[in-house]
Amino acid sequence: MARRHGRSLAALVAAVVVLAACSPASGETATTTEVPAMSSTSTSTTATSSTTTTITTTTTTLPPTTTTLPPTTTTTTRPELPDIGVEVKVPDGEGPFPAVVLVHGGGWLTGDPSIMRPMATFLTDEGFLTVNTPYKLSNESPGFPQAVDDVACAVRYAAAHPNSDGTVVLIGHSAGAQISAIVALAGDRYAADCPIPGTGLPDRLVGLAGPYDVSRLGIIMLPFFGAGPIANPDAWLAGNPQRLTDENTDLVSLIMYGGSDGIVDSQFAIDFQRALSDSGSESLLEEVEGALHSQMRDPDWVGDLIVTWLER
């Protein structure tokens, strides 16, 4: 279903930031007592008297004794997680907590988790365990598929964290939204070398100002794929969320775009959300009226909308 809060934008694409009984003895034999003979001068008579003593045996049956043992409690301790370079924030109070993985943007070439720290702080204060992850940038060598591997591994980490309830929401902005969308739809294909078991598939996706159809981005994606679509068509297909929407129809998503983005055309979000809905997924489209591209990762602009959707 789609919901709009404002107007849509023109199409302009630039670099995107993108677990008993008891028985007593019974029976005695009869006892005979002989009386001594009594004598007289005329008659001699011998009399024998027999006395029988009867012993009564009483059998007492005790009720069965039942011993109830206290229930056995088995405590499963999750193994300590390896360091994969993520920033983790755990809410105050008693967990476990739903987990959120945050993926920064930066046009696939730049950026780090610091970009998403304000959102991580906001969501942690709202009761979510946050995992703010880096990923392989494309500035020195192609980012695909390692960037996707890194984010899929972070999803496994979040699900396995001792303070996590095992559910994971993946939130990506700009280029991070494009990478997050690949993981949300096909993350079980990635992160073969991740030291943490799991599928890599999140339960839900929030895409913030993402350029999802990479076929429309042209040379901007060359550093990410390392070659053009003719030279490496398999990579361009595997790395295009717009073409993967049938891969995980259990996905629930919120696709958001800024009404005044200025960098990523709103049509990317509109087309991607429509493709998700057409595949049978539950997906919601949301325009944030007046929001610039950078404001689409700002909790002051989108934080309450995200939390309201997550808590529904």
Image (cartoon, rainbow, N blue to C red):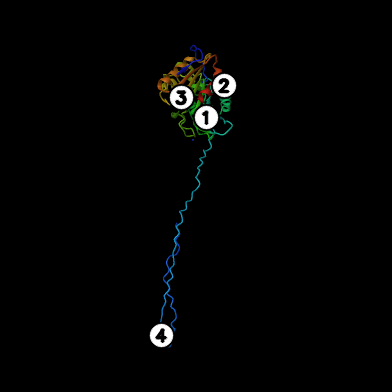
Residue identifier under label 4: 44
Number of the front mark, 4 or 3: 4
Distance, label 1 to label 3, CA atoms, is: 15 Å
SS label for mark 4: strand
Q: Are marks 1 and 3 in contact (CB under 8 Å)?
A: no
Which residue is at 58% across, 24% downward?
Answer: 118
Residue at mark 3: 252
Q: Which residue is mark 1?
A: 99
Q: Quadrant of residue 1?
A: top left
Of the numbered discs 1 and 4, the one sitting upstream in the chain is: 4
Mark 4 or mark 2, whichever is nearer to me: 4
| Residue 110 appears in the rendering | no
Amino acid type indicated by mark 3: Val
- State the SS at label 3: strand
CA neighbours of label 1 inside 10 A, class few (<14), some (14 to 19), many (20+): many
- The amino acid type of the residue labelled 4 equals Ser
- SS at mark 2 in the image: helix
Q: Position of residue 292 (x, y in %)?
A: 55, 15
Crowd rating for badge 2 (residues with CA inside 10 Å; few <14, some 14–19, many 20+)? some
Quarter assignment of residue 20: bottom left
Q: Is residue 49 left or right of residue 299?
A: left
Task: State the residue in front, 39 or 261.
Answer: 39
Q: Is residue 100 visible?
A: yes
